[in-house]
Amino acid sequence: MHGMDRNRRGGWLLLALALVAALGLTVCALGLREGEAHLLFGGVVLVAIAVAGQLQRVAERPGRDGGTPSLSERASWQHVGVGMAAILVLGGLSLGSMQGRFSSWLFFFAYVLIVAFYPQFRTRFIEANLRHRDLAGDERDHVLRAQGDRVAKRVLELALVATAVAWVAMPGLSAPSAEPVRVASLLLSLVLVANVVGEARVAWLYWRDRQ
Amino acid sequence: MTGTPIANDIRRLRFEHGEMTQQVLADACRVTRQTIIALEAGRYAPSLELAFRIARAFGVGVEDVFRWEGG
């Protein structure tokens, strides 16, 4: 009975992911036709979210030893998804989506909270899902997280350098995007991209250890 | 974390100790079951503290559980 429920849930999730991917491709096509960078970006991120969702479904299957994902592993996948959704909005803002509107500032400040309290959200997710005999984390979790943090730090450094170089080398590209909310959104997007890459690295390390 | 030079006999010791489950060992050592799985598969080298905890759970010395197999 539980198996049937799980299969039905899996089927609905797959359908939802396929719809997100289809929506992403449609938005991409629209962005290309209209020549709107933020639409093209949004479409690409939606497709990436669908791909990440499918990867998570595959990765959370029991491993060779029957090992199911730990709460920390599931938290990493959860945060890849949340991070990508935030990149969708903030990246869009930095490319001119909702330009000049009050809503752009509203979204920006809403996502400031996500970026600022990212580690706390992770801890909260794990604590909320703790069951009998589950542990919030152990030394191996800390080792894997440290590897993810190293990757995230490096990605953030490279992204900031690339942005700085682009800003100086291509003044024509950067001039129209000098609106404060766009610059601020770009900076937050870079932090989120680094965090998502770091979490994806951690999720992959967990998955590899269970194979 | 693949290819650690530290091999171990955790699986054998579990079976010699009344077929102790991975979860029971994990609880005794205050780690997750996933960490025990990773240790048994040789994909994770434990800290000195965890190595002692595991040896203590079996009532043996650390060298009876872990051995160096690097060059």
Image (cartoon, coloured by chain):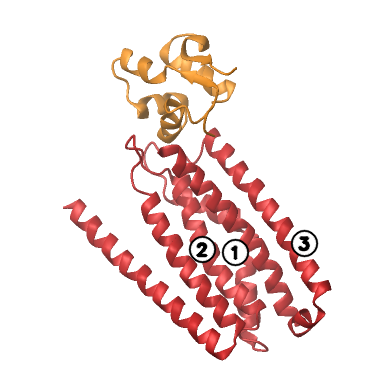
Chain colours: A red, B orange
Helix or strand or loop: what does disc 3 sit on? helix
Q: Position of residue A137 (x, y in %)?
A: 51, 39
Q: Which residue is mark 2?
A: A82
User: What label sits on residue A114 in the rendered view?
Assistant: 1
Residue in view at x 52 percent, y 12 percent = B62
Q: Position of residue A197 (x, y in %)?
A: 58, 55
Would you say A83 lies left or right of A19 here?
Answer: right
| Discs 3, 1: same chain | yes
- Dot 1 amino acid type: Ile
Mark 2 vs mark 1: in front: 2
Query: Chain for mark 1?
Result: A
Mark 2 → mark 1, Cα distance in angstroms: 9 Å
Query: Chain for mark 3?
Result: A
Q: Quadrant of the C terminus of chain A?
A: top left
- Dot 2 amino acid type: Val
Residue in view at x 36 percent, y 16 percent = B12
